[in-house]
Image (cartoon, helix red, strand yellow):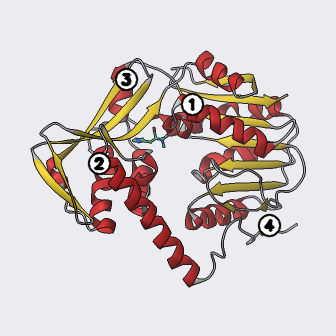
């Protein structure tokens, strides 16, 4: 059977250029609203999803290859080394549903380990990433039906056009760490509804660990993570007629012990006034904008969270240095 990439996408008519420019406009309006609201409130904060424009996504790819950034390489090694064992624990599966079309390397390793998989459904808000990932995966796995779904999986209530059969969800890279515990629980409840009865869910979750390892992963020597954070201000300048001087803000990564998370901030190095879309924002020296959270979970902590969202923990795999975990969950 030849690989088939379905073009029936979930939302809109993304093929036409009119639809594309309308979509771009809607995205800019959403970004503007979030930035103006986020800079006006105290403490100031901007949601982390806005870090991922084209420049930010390319910088994040660079982060995943840094010596200090252990999550990507550790998760990939777990999938490679324990893939057979993981596939056995999962059992029969027909449809793989990936939340966020991540690096196709990790997905490929999982697909290879799973025997008898029929279809792969990557879900992502970015149509271009999705199309590219879908094309790569279809080319790499002859006989696999690839049906990309454009949309925000946190708000999706059904898997439009999904084939019948046993489903496995996949949410890699500890992306769930961006969510608060409450948001993560909500996400898991929604995923249970999307995947349906008897489904399984494989998630990559970053472990709690020594700060000597954790902090450099979010504040590397080459300053790639700093550039990734500061790109948010550059993006505001590009898209929202902003005048941030990116040399007058610094990237800060701090661990919040009580909340079990790395918090990322942009800190004003001086007293300064910045303009965005004609509005003024005055920063005191040392005043911060909160841009990201990266929650860390021990194995039992994540299992308790999963249980509270209606998922039964089946097994968890960790590397020998206890840096990263893969959790398998099952719906009763
Ligand atoms: C994509 C959310 C998993 O928290 O490790 C990495 C994002 N930010 N370095 C993470 C991130 C700065 C990353 N996640």
- Local SS, label 3: strand
Quadrant of the snapshot with the C terminus: top right
- Local SS, label 2: helix
Label 1 to label 3, Cα distance in Å? 17 Å
How far across and down, in percent of the image, does residue 209 sit?
44, 19
Residue displayed at 66% across by 55% down: 123
Label 1 to label 2, Cα distance in Å? 24 Å
Residue displayed at 48% across by 21% down: 208
Of badges 4 and 1, nearer the viewer stands 1
Q: Residue 3 carries which label?
A: 4
Of badges 1 and 3, nearer the viewer stands 1
**Dot 2 corresponds to which residue?**
40
Residue displayed at 57% across by 51% down: 103
Q: Which of 26 and 209 is in front in this view?
A: 26
**Dot 1 corresponds to which residue?**
182
Q: Of the residues under marks 4 and 3, which one precedes in the sequence?
A: 4
């Amino acid at each position: 059977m030849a690989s088939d990439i379905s073009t029936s996408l979930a939302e809109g008519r993304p093929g036409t250029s009119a639809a594309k420019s309308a979509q771009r406009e809607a995205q800019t309006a959403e970004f503007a609203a979030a930035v103006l609201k986020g800079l006006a409130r105290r403490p100031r904060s901007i949601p982390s999803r806005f870090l991922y424009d084209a420049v930010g996504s390319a910088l994040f790819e660079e982060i995943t290859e840094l010596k200090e950034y252990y999550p990507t390489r550790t998760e990939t090694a777990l999938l490679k080394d324990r893939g057979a064992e993981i596939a056995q624990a999962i059992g029969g599966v027909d449809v793989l549903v990936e939340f966020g079309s991540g690096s196709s390397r990790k997905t490929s390793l999982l697909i290879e380990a799973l025997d008898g998989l029929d279809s792969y459904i990557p879900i992502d808000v970015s149509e271009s990433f999705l199309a590219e990932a879908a094309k790569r995966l279809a080319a790499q796995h002859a006989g696999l039906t690839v049906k990309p779904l454009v949309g925000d999986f946190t708000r999706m209530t059904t898997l439009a056009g999904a084939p019948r059969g046993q489903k496995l969800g996949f949410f890699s890279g500890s992306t769930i760490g961006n969510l608060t515990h409450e948001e993560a629980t909500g996400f898991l409840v929604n995923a249970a509804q999307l995947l349906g009865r008897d489904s399984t869910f494989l998630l990559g979750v970053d472990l709690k660990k020594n700060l000597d390892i954790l902090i450099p992963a979010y504040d590397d020597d080459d300053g790639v993570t700093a550039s990734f954070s500061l790109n948010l201000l550059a993006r505001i300048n590009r898209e929202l007629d902003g005048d941030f001087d990116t040399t007058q803000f610094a990237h800060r990564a701090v661990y919040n012990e009580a909340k079990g998370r790395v918090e990322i901030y942009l800190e004003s190095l001086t007293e300064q006034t910045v303009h965005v879309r004609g509005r003024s924002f005055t920063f005191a020296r040392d005043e911060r904008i909160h841009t990201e959270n990266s929650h860390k979970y021990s194995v039992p902590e994540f299992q308790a969270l999963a249980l509270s969202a209606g998922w039964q923990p089946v097994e968890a795999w960790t590397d020998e240095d206890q840096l990263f975990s893969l959790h398998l969950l099952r719906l009763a």
